[in-house]
Image (cartoon, grey):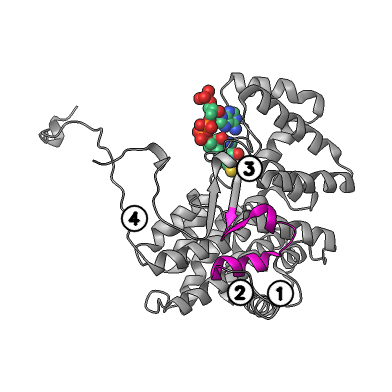
Amino acid sequence: MPVSSRGLEGIVANTTRLSAVIGDKGQLIYCGYDINELAGKVSYEEVVFLLWNNRLPNRRELSECEETLRSLRQLPDGVVELIKNAPKNANPMDVMRTAISMLGMYDPDALKEMSADANKQRARSITAKIGVIAAYFHRARQGKELPPVRGDLGEAAHFLYLMSGEEPTKEAADTLDVAFVLHADHGTNASTFSARVTISTLTDVYSAITSAIGTLKGPLHGGANEGVIHMLEEIGSEDRVDAYIEKQLAEKKKIMGIGHRVYKTLDPRAPHLRNMAVKLSEKVGEPKWIKMSERIAQLMKEKKNLNANVDFYSATVYHSLGIPTDLFTPVFAIARCSGWCAHILEQLEDNRLFRPLSEYVGEPVGKKVVPIDERP
Ligand SMILES: CC(C)(COP(=O)(O)OP(=O)(O)OC[C@H]1O[C@@H](n2cnc3c(N)ncnc32)[C@H](O)[C@@H]1OP(=O)(O)O)[C@@H](O)C(=O)NCCC(=O)NCCS
Protein backbone atom coordinates (compact mmCIF):
# COMPACT_ATOMS: atom_id res chain seq x y z
CA MET A 1 0.00 0.00 0.00
CA PRO A 2 1.74 3.22 -1.13
CA VAL A 3 2.24 5.86 1.58
CA SER A 4 1.35 9.39 0.56
CA SER A 5 3.09 12.38 2.13
CA ARG A 6 3.18 15.90 0.73
CA GLY A 7 6.74 17.15 0.48
CA LEU A 8 7.83 13.60 1.43
CA GLU A 9 7.55 14.69 5.05
CA GLY A 10 8.23 11.78 7.39
CA ILE A 11 9.35 9.50 4.55
CA VAL A 12 12.72 7.78 4.86
CA ALA A 13 14.06 7.85 1.29
CA ASN A 14 17.59 6.53 1.77
CA THR A 15 20.18 5.49 4.31
CA THR A 16 23.26 7.59 5.03
CA ARG A 17 26.18 7.43 7.40
CA LEU A 18 27.05 11.07 6.74
CA SER A 19 24.76 13.16 8.89
CA ALA A 20 21.71 12.89 11.10
CA VAL A 21 19.26 15.64 11.89
CA ILE A 22 17.44 14.70 15.09
CA GLY A 23 14.59 17.16 15.17
CA ASP A 24 13.06 16.44 18.58
CA LYS A 25 16.42 16.62 20.36
CA GLY A 26 17.73 19.57 18.34
CA GLN A 27 20.80 17.56 17.40
CA LEU A 28 22.95 17.51 14.25
CA ILE A 29 25.49 14.73 13.83
CA TYR A 30 28.25 14.37 11.25
CA CYS A 31 29.60 10.78 11.04
CA GLY A 32 29.06 10.17 14.74
CA TYR A 33 30.20 13.60 15.97
CA ASP A 34 27.70 16.01 17.49
CA ILE A 35 28.01 19.38 15.73
CA ASN A 36 28.66 20.97 19.15
CA GLU A 37 31.73 18.76 19.45
CA LEU A 38 33.05 19.78 16.03
CA ALA A 39 32.26 23.52 15.86
CA GLY A 40 35.27 25.53 16.95
CA LYS A 41 37.46 22.43 17.38
CA VAL A 42 38.00 21.31 13.80
CA SER A 43 38.54 23.22 10.58
CA TYR A 44 36.26 23.09 7.54
CA GLU A 45 38.90 21.03 5.72
CA GLU A 46 38.83 18.47 8.54
CA VAL A 47 35.06 18.25 8.09
CA VAL A 48 35.50 17.82 4.33
CA PHE A 49 37.82 14.89 5.03
CA LEU A 50 35.41 13.52 7.64
CA LEU A 51 32.45 13.58 5.26
CA TRP A 52 34.42 12.01 2.42
CA ASN A 53 36.17 9.34 4.51
CA ASN A 54 33.85 8.86 7.47
CA ARG A 55 36.64 9.64 9.95
CA LEU A 56 38.69 12.66 10.97
CA PRO A 57 42.12 12.98 9.33
CA ASN A 58 45.44 12.72 11.10
CA ARG A 59 47.86 15.61 10.63
CA ARG A 60 49.45 14.17 7.48
CA GLU A 61 46.08 13.38 5.89
CA LEU A 62 44.80 16.85 6.68
CA SER A 63 47.84 18.47 5.05
CA GLU A 64 47.34 16.33 1.95
CA CYS A 65 43.64 17.20 1.81
CA GLU A 66 44.39 20.93 2.18
CA GLU A 67 47.13 20.83 -0.43
CA THR A 68 44.98 18.96 -2.91
CA LEU A 69 42.10 21.42 -2.55
CA ARG A 70 44.47 24.38 -2.86
CA SER A 71 46.08 22.92 -5.99
CA LEU A 72 42.71 22.60 -7.75
CA ARG A 73 41.50 26.19 -7.38
CA GLN A 74 42.47 27.47 -10.82
CA LEU A 75 39.42 27.82 -13.09
CA PRO A 76 39.61 26.96 -16.80
CA ASP A 77 39.96 30.10 -18.94
CA GLY A 78 36.53 29.54 -20.48
CA VAL A 79 34.88 29.58 -17.05
CA VAL A 80 36.75 32.78 -16.14
CA GLU A 81 35.46 34.32 -19.39
CA LEU A 82 31.92 33.18 -18.57
CA ILE A 83 32.17 34.88 -15.18
CA LYS A 84 33.61 38.07 -16.69
CA ASN A 85 30.90 38.18 -19.36
CA ALA A 86 27.96 37.38 -17.09
CA PRO A 87 25.49 40.27 -16.74
CA LYS A 88 26.62 42.45 -13.84
CA ASN A 89 23.16 42.25 -12.32
CA ALA A 90 22.97 38.45 -12.57
CA ASN A 91 22.00 36.51 -9.47
CA PRO A 92 25.34 35.09 -8.19
CA MET A 93 23.64 31.71 -7.64
CA ASP A 94 22.82 31.62 -11.36
CA VAL A 95 26.45 32.36 -12.20
CA MET A 96 27.61 29.67 -9.77
CA ARG A 97 25.14 27.13 -11.17
CA THR A 98 26.13 27.89 -14.76
CA ALA A 99 29.88 27.91 -14.05
CA ILE A 100 29.73 24.53 -12.27
CA SER A 101 27.70 23.16 -15.14
CA MET A 102 30.32 24.54 -17.55
CA LEU A 103 33.11 22.81 -15.63
CA GLY A 104 31.48 19.57 -16.78
CA MET A 105 32.32 20.50 -20.39
CA TYR A 106 36.01 20.47 -19.48
CA ASP A 107 35.68 16.87 -18.30
CA PRO A 108 34.43 14.96 -21.36
CA ASP A 109 34.92 11.64 -19.57
CA ALA A 110 32.62 12.63 -16.70
CA LEU A 111 29.96 10.15 -17.79
CA LYS A 112 32.28 7.45 -19.13
CA GLU A 113 34.75 7.26 -16.25
CA MET A 114 32.55 6.85 -13.19
CA SER A 115 34.98 5.03 -10.87
CA ALA A 116 34.84 6.07 -7.22
CA ASP A 117 38.36 7.53 -7.49
CA ALA A 118 37.53 9.59 -10.57
CA ASN A 119 34.37 10.94 -8.97
CA LYS A 120 36.20 11.74 -5.75
CA GLN A 121 38.69 13.76 -7.76
CA ARG A 122 35.79 15.64 -9.34
CA ALA A 123 34.37 16.26 -5.87
CA ARG A 124 37.72 17.75 -4.79
CA SER A 125 37.92 19.87 -7.93
CA ILE A 126 34.39 21.28 -7.63
CA THR A 127 34.77 21.91 -3.88
CA ALA A 128 38.04 23.75 -4.53
CA LYS A 129 36.60 25.88 -7.33
CA ILE A 130 33.12 26.79 -6.14
CA GLY A 131 34.32 29.57 -3.81
CA VAL A 132 36.57 31.00 -6.51
CA ILE A 133 33.57 31.22 -8.85
CA ALA A 134 31.50 33.22 -6.34
CA ALA A 135 34.36 35.54 -5.38
CA TYR A 136 35.44 36.16 -8.99
CA PHE A 137 31.92 37.03 -10.04
CA HIS A 138 31.64 39.52 -7.21
CA ARG A 139 34.84 41.22 -8.35
CA ALA A 140 34.01 41.03 -12.05
CA ARG A 141 30.62 42.67 -11.60
CA GLN A 142 32.31 45.61 -9.90
CA GLY A 143 34.72 45.92 -12.84
CA LYS A 144 37.65 44.86 -10.65
CA GLU A 145 40.50 42.62 -11.75
CA LEU A 146 40.50 38.96 -10.72
CA PRO A 147 43.45 38.20 -8.45
CA PRO A 148 45.25 34.91 -9.14
CA VAL A 149 44.23 32.10 -6.82
CA ARG A 150 46.59 31.50 -3.89
CA GLY A 151 47.81 28.25 -2.41
CA ASP A 152 48.66 29.50 1.06
CA LEU A 153 45.20 30.13 2.51
CA GLY A 154 42.49 27.81 3.83
CA GLU A 155 39.12 27.62 2.07
CA ALA A 156 37.35 30.26 4.18
CA ALA A 157 40.28 32.71 4.22
CA HIS A 158 40.84 32.24 0.48
CA PHE A 159 37.23 33.07 -0.31
CA LEU A 160 37.36 36.26 1.78
CA TYR A 161 40.68 37.20 0.18
CA LEU A 162 39.43 36.75 -3.40
CA MET A 163 36.14 38.50 -2.66
CA SER A 164 37.66 41.60 -1.08
CA GLY A 165 41.17 41.59 -2.56
CA GLU A 166 42.58 41.84 0.97
CA GLU A 167 43.85 39.14 3.24
CA PRO A 168 41.25 38.66 5.99
CA THR A 169 42.05 38.95 9.69
CA LYS A 170 42.49 35.66 11.50
CA GLU A 171 39.26 36.34 13.38
CA ALA A 172 37.28 36.85 10.16
CA ALA A 173 38.75 33.73 8.55
CA ASP A 174 38.13 31.64 11.67
CA THR A 175 34.54 32.89 11.93
CA LEU A 176 33.74 31.97 8.33
CA ASP A 177 35.51 28.65 8.83
CA VAL A 178 33.15 27.79 11.71
CA ALA A 179 30.18 28.88 9.58
CA PHE A 180 31.42 26.52 6.84
CA VAL A 181 31.67 23.69 9.40
CA LEU A 182 28.09 24.33 10.53
CA HIS A 183 26.75 24.41 6.95
CA ALA A 184 28.69 21.47 5.48
CA ASP A 185 25.97 18.85 5.70
CA HIS A 186 22.42 18.45 6.90
CA GLY A 187 20.81 15.09 6.20
CA THR A 188 18.38 14.82 3.31
CA ASN A 189 17.64 18.52 2.93
CA ALA A 190 16.10 19.62 -0.38
CA SER A 191 19.36 20.42 -2.23
CA THR A 192 21.11 17.27 -1.03
CA PHE A 193 18.06 15.26 -2.04
CA SER A 194 18.22 16.92 -5.47
CA ALA A 195 21.87 15.96 -5.79
CA ARG A 196 21.11 12.36 -4.80
CA VAL A 197 18.09 12.10 -7.12
CA THR A 198 20.13 13.51 -10.01
CA ILE A 199 23.15 11.25 -9.51
CA SER A 200 20.85 8.24 -9.01
CA THR A 201 20.23 8.35 -12.77
CA LEU A 202 23.99 7.70 -13.13
CA THR A 203 24.52 11.07 -14.71
CA ASP A 204 27.74 12.98 -13.94
CA VAL A 205 28.78 14.75 -10.73
CA TYR A 206 28.64 18.23 -12.34
CA SER A 207 24.98 17.73 -13.24
CA ALA A 208 24.17 16.65 -9.69
CA ILE A 209 25.88 19.69 -8.13
CA THR A 210 24.17 21.94 -10.69
CA SER A 211 20.79 20.55 -9.56
CA ALA A 212 21.72 21.08 -5.93
CA ILE A 213 22.72 24.72 -6.49
CA GLY A 214 19.45 25.43 -8.28
CA THR A 215 17.54 23.90 -5.39
CA LEU A 216 19.47 25.74 -2.68
CA LYS A 217 18.68 29.06 -4.37
CA GLY A 218 15.01 28.94 -3.30
CA PRO A 219 13.86 31.28 -0.51
CA LEU A 220 12.51 28.38 1.56
CA HIS A 221 15.97 26.79 1.57
CA GLY A 222 19.32 28.61 1.23
CA GLY A 223 17.76 31.86 0.11
CA ALA A 224 16.31 32.49 3.57
CA ASN A 225 19.53 34.07 4.89
CA GLU A 226 19.29 36.86 2.32
CA GLY A 227 15.66 37.33 3.29
CA VAL A 228 16.74 37.92 6.89
CA ILE A 229 18.93 40.90 5.97
CA HIS A 230 16.24 42.34 3.69
CA MET A 231 13.80 42.01 6.59
CA LEU A 232 16.20 43.72 9.05
CA GLU A 233 16.77 46.53 6.55
CA GLU A 234 13.03 46.91 6.06
CA ILE A 235 12.42 47.08 9.82
CA GLY A 236 15.24 49.60 10.21
CA SER A 237 15.35 49.98 14.00
CA GLU A 238 14.73 48.02 17.18
CA ASP A 239 11.65 50.01 18.18
CA ARG A 240 9.85 48.97 14.98
CA VAL A 241 10.33 45.22 15.42
CA ASP A 242 7.16 44.48 17.40
CA ALA A 243 4.83 46.24 14.97
CA TYR A 244 6.53 44.60 11.98
CA ILE A 245 6.20 41.08 13.38
CA GLU A 246 2.61 41.67 14.39
CA LYS A 247 1.72 42.86 10.90
CA GLN A 248 3.53 40.01 9.14
CA LEU A 249 1.86 37.40 11.32
CA ALA A 250 -1.57 39.02 10.89
CA GLU A 251 -1.04 38.82 7.13
CA LYS A 252 0.08 35.17 7.49
CA LYS A 253 3.50 36.01 6.07
CA LYS A 254 6.59 33.98 6.95
CA ILE A 255 9.40 35.50 8.98
CA MET A 256 12.66 34.55 7.28
CA GLY A 257 15.15 32.58 9.36
CA ILE A 258 12.48 31.30 11.74
CA GLY A 259 11.08 27.77 11.93
CA HIS A 260 12.34 24.51 10.55
CA ARG A 261 10.82 21.47 8.89
CA VAL A 262 12.73 19.05 11.14
CA TYR A 263 14.04 20.91 14.21
CA LYS A 264 11.08 21.64 16.42
CA THR A 265 13.01 22.44 19.62
CA LEU A 266 16.29 24.04 18.58
CA ASP A 267 18.45 24.31 15.47
CA PRO A 268 21.80 23.40 17.10
CA ARG A 269 23.71 25.53 14.59
CA ALA A 270 21.88 28.70 15.58
CA PRO A 271 23.51 29.26 19.04
CA HIS A 272 27.02 29.05 17.52
CA LEU A 273 26.11 31.58 14.86
CA ARG A 274 24.34 33.76 17.41
CA ASN A 275 27.47 33.94 19.57
CA MET A 276 29.59 34.82 16.56
CA ALA A 277 27.03 37.41 15.45
CA VAL A 278 27.06 39.06 18.91
CA LYS A 279 30.87 39.28 18.96
CA LEU A 280 31.18 40.55 15.40
CA SER A 281 28.36 43.09 15.70
CA GLU A 282 30.07 44.65 18.72
CA LYS A 283 33.40 44.69 16.93
CA VAL A 284 32.05 46.17 13.71
CA GLY A 285 30.08 48.70 15.74
CA GLU A 286 26.65 47.75 14.39
CA PRO A 287 24.86 46.31 17.43
CA LYS A 288 21.43 47.24 16.10
CA TRP A 289 21.32 44.20 13.78
CA ILE A 290 21.80 41.72 16.56
CA LYS A 291 19.47 43.62 18.89
CA MET A 292 16.70 43.54 16.27
CA SER A 293 17.41 39.86 15.63
CA GLU A 294 17.20 38.99 19.31
CA ARG A 295 13.83 40.73 19.65
CA ILE A 296 12.44 38.98 16.54
CA ALA A 297 13.60 35.60 17.88
CA GLN A 298 12.02 36.34 21.27
CA LEU A 299 8.69 37.40 19.74
CA MET A 300 8.51 34.39 17.43
CA LYS A 301 9.17 32.07 20.35
CA GLU A 302 6.46 33.75 22.44
CA LYS A 303 3.86 34.08 19.70
CA LYS A 304 4.36 30.95 17.59
CA ASN A 305 6.72 28.78 19.65
CA LEU A 306 9.10 28.81 16.67
CA ASN A 307 12.89 29.01 16.93
CA ALA A 308 15.54 30.82 14.95
CA ASN A 309 17.22 28.56 12.39
CA VAL A 310 20.75 28.52 10.95
CA ASP A 311 19.97 31.31 8.49
CA PHE A 312 18.73 33.74 11.08
CA TYR A 313 22.09 34.54 12.67
CA SER A 314 24.32 33.55 9.75
CA ALA A 315 22.88 36.60 7.98
CA THR A 316 24.28 38.95 10.64
CA VAL A 317 27.59 37.05 10.73
CA TYR A 318 28.06 37.34 6.96
CA HIS A 319 26.97 40.97 6.94
CA SER A 320 29.51 41.77 9.67
CA LEU A 321 32.22 39.99 7.65
CA GLY A 322 31.56 42.41 4.79
CA ILE A 323 29.95 39.78 2.57
CA PRO A 324 27.31 41.38 0.32
CA THR A 325 23.78 40.12 0.88
CA ASP A 326 23.41 38.42 -2.49
CA LEU A 327 26.50 36.31 -1.75
CA PHE A 328 24.98 34.80 1.41
CA THR A 329 23.39 31.88 -0.42
CA PRO A 330 26.53 31.30 -2.55
CA VAL A 331 28.52 31.18 0.71
CA PHE A 332 26.08 28.54 1.97
CA ALA A 333 26.61 26.65 -1.31
CA ILE A 334 30.40 26.81 -0.96
CA ALA A 335 30.21 25.09 2.42
CA ARG A 336 27.43 22.66 1.49
CA CYS A 337 29.27 21.58 -1.66
CA SER A 338 31.39 19.22 0.45
CA GLY A 339 28.22 17.61 1.84
CA TRP A 340 26.58 17.35 -1.58
CA CYS A 341 29.70 15.65 -2.91
CA ALA A 342 29.78 13.24 0.03
CA HIS A 343 26.14 12.30 -0.60
CA ILE A 344 26.76 11.88 -4.33
CA LEU A 345 29.69 9.53 -3.65
CA GLU A 346 27.65 7.64 -1.07
CA GLN A 347 24.66 7.33 -3.41
CA LEU A 348 26.87 5.87 -6.13
CA GLU A 349 28.30 3.25 -3.75
CA ASP A 350 24.94 1.51 -3.59
CA ASN A 351 22.74 3.22 -6.13
CA ARG A 352 19.03 2.83 -6.58
CA LEU A 353 17.17 5.15 -8.94
CA PHE A 354 14.79 7.47 -7.06
CA ARG A 355 11.31 7.07 -8.52
CA PRO A 356 8.48 7.98 -6.12
CA LEU A 357 4.84 7.71 -7.10
CA SER A 358 2.29 10.47 -7.48
CA GLU A 359 -1.28 10.30 -6.29
CA TYR A 360 -3.35 11.14 -9.35
CA VAL A 361 -6.09 13.64 -8.49
CA GLY A 362 -6.99 14.60 -12.07
CA GLU A 363 -10.15 13.94 -14.05
CA PRO A 364 -11.35 10.34 -14.13
CA VAL A 365 -10.14 8.46 -17.19
CA GLY A 366 -12.49 8.05 -20.14
CA LYS A 367 -12.59 11.53 -21.67
CA LYS A 368 -12.88 11.68 -25.46
CA VAL A 369 -10.84 14.02 -27.66
CA VAL A 370 -13.06 16.80 -29.09
CA PRO A 371 -11.86 17.93 -32.55
CA ILE A 372 -9.87 21.16 -32.15
CA ASP A 373 -12.36 23.37 -34.03
CA GLU A 374 -15.21 22.21 -31.80
CA ARG A 375 -13.47 22.96 -28.51
CA PRO A 376 -14.80 25.94 -26.53
C1 LIG B 1 11.31 26.18 7.12
C2 LIG B 1 9.80 26.14 6.91
C3 LIG B 1 9.48 26.03 5.40
C4 LIG B 1 9.21 24.94 7.67
O1 LIG B 1 7.87 24.96 7.39
P1 LIG B 1 6.85 23.96 8.08
O2 LIG B 1 7.48 22.65 8.31
O3 LIG B 1 5.62 23.99 7.25
O4 LIG B 1 6.58 24.69 9.47
P2 LIG B 1 5.63 24.22 10.64
O5 LIG B 1 4.76 23.09 10.20
O6 LIG B 1 6.49 24.02 11.84
O7 LIG B 1 4.75 25.49 10.90
C5 LIG B 1 3.95 25.59 12.05
C6 LIG B 1 3.20 26.89 12.02
O8 LIG B 1 4.12 27.96 12.11
C7 LIG B 1 4.02 28.79 10.98
N1 LIG B 1 5.35 29.17 10.59
C8 LIG B 1 6.39 28.35 10.32
N2 LIG B 1 7.46 29.08 10.01
C9 LIG B 1 7.09 30.37 10.11
C10 LIG B 1 7.76 31.56 9.90
N3 LIG B 1 9.03 31.59 9.53
N4 LIG B 1 7.09 32.72 10.09
C11 LIG B 1 5.80 32.71 10.45
N5 LIG B 1 5.10 31.59 10.67
C12 LIG B 1 5.75 30.44 10.49
C13 LIG B 1 3.34 27.96 9.93
O9 LIG B 1 2.68 28.77 8.97
C14 LIG B 1 2.40 27.16 10.78
O10 LIG B 1 1.35 28.01 11.15
P3 LIG B 1 -0.16 27.46 11.28
O11 LIG B 1 -0.08 26.36 12.29
O12 LIG B 1 -0.92 28.67 11.72
O13 LIG B 1 -0.51 26.98 9.91
C15 LIG B 1 9.14 27.42 7.49
O14 LIG B 1 9.39 27.49 8.88
C16 LIG B 1 9.61 28.68 6.79
O15 LIG B 1 9.13 29.03 5.72
N6 LIG B 1 10.56 29.44 7.43
C17 LIG B 1 11.09 30.64 6.85
C18 LIG B 1 12.11 30.33 5.76
C19 LIG B 1 13.42 29.84 6.35
O16 LIG B 1 13.95 30.41 7.30
N7 LIG B 1 13.95 28.76 5.74
C20 LIG B 1 15.24 28.21 6.11
C21 LIG B 1 15.08 26.88 6.78
S1 LIG B 1 16.64 26.35 7.41
- Position of the N terminus, as image quadrant, is top left
Q: CA distance from mark 3 to mark 2?
A: 36 Å
Classify the position of ligand 1 by quadrant: top left, top right, bottom left or bottom right. top right
Residue under label 3, please give it.
Answer: 267
Residue 142 seen from this side: no
**Mark 1 crowdedness (10 Å alpha carbons): few <14, some 14-19, many ≥20:** many
Q: Are marks 1 and 3 in contact (CB under 8 Å)?
A: no
Q: Residue beneath label 4, please?
A: 354
Instruction: Give me the disc on residue 75.
Output: 2
| Contact (Cβ within 8 Å) of mark 1 with mark 2 | yes
| Range covered by the magenta-colored residues | 29-54
**Residue 4's image quarter?**
top left
Amino acid tagged 2:
Leu
- Alpha carbon of mark 1 to alpha carbon of mark 3: how far? 35 Å
Assign a secondary structure to mark 1: loop
Circle 4: residue type: Phe
Circle 4: is it few (<14), some (14-19), or many (20+) Cα within 10 Å? Answer: some
* CA gap, disc 1 and disc 2: 9 Å
SS of the residue under disc 4: loop
The kind of residue tagged 3 is Asp
Residue 227: horizontal and vertical position, in percent? 64, 39
Q: Position of residue 70 (x, y in %)?
A: 67, 76
| Mark before the other along the chain sequence, 1 or 2 | 2
